[in-house]
Amino acid sequence: YLGGRGGIRKLVQLDSSSEMLHRDDLFRELSAGQAGNGDKTNSSVCETYKLVAEEEQPLPFPDGTFDLVISSMAFHWINDLPR
């Protein structure tokens, strides 16, 4: 058993904006309350960590920490990609 949704056991969400990082929290809380059975929705599927990171600073994780990284709307900020 891999655990979590799709085998994901821990999820790390990272953004430089706390507002963007937490923008859907209220929606998730309201959705969970409307489910009627008191169960949490996606938030109970895996451990979720939300971190605010400073722009242009190294990330606080050692190499090899993650099995998968998904980035949205970030590559235009990266100037030193390997060729």
Image: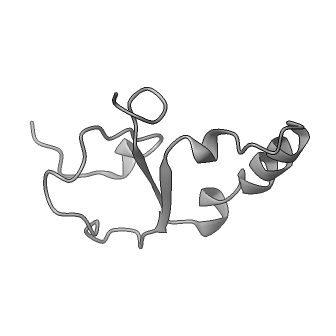
Q: Position of residue 34 (x, y in %)?
A: 90, 40
User: Where 16 sits versus 80, above or below?
Assistant: below
Residue at point 62% right, 47% down? Answer: 43
Residue at point 34% right, 30% down? Answer: 2
Front position in the image: 22 or 37: 37
Q: Position of residue 72 (x, y in %)?
A: 46, 40
Q: Position of residue 73 (x, y in %)?
A: 47, 42
Q: Quadrant of residue 7?
A: top left
Q: Is residue 67 left or right of residue 52?
A: left
Front position in the image: 60 or 82: 60
Quadrant location of the N terminus in the rendered image: top left
Front position in the image: 56 or 46: 46
Residue at point 33% right, 68% down? Answer: 56
Q: Is residue 81 left or right of residue 3?
A: left
Q: Is residue 68 left or right of residue 14?
A: left
Describe the colour scheme in one phrase. Answer: one colour
- Number of marks drawn: 0
User: Where 29 sits versus 71, above or below?
Assistant: below
Quadrant location of the C terminus in the rendered image: top left
Q: Is residue 33 left or right of residue 14?
A: right
Front position in the image: 66 or 82: 66
Residue at point 79% right, 52% down? Answer: 29
Q: Position of residue 39 (x, y in %)?
A: 74, 42
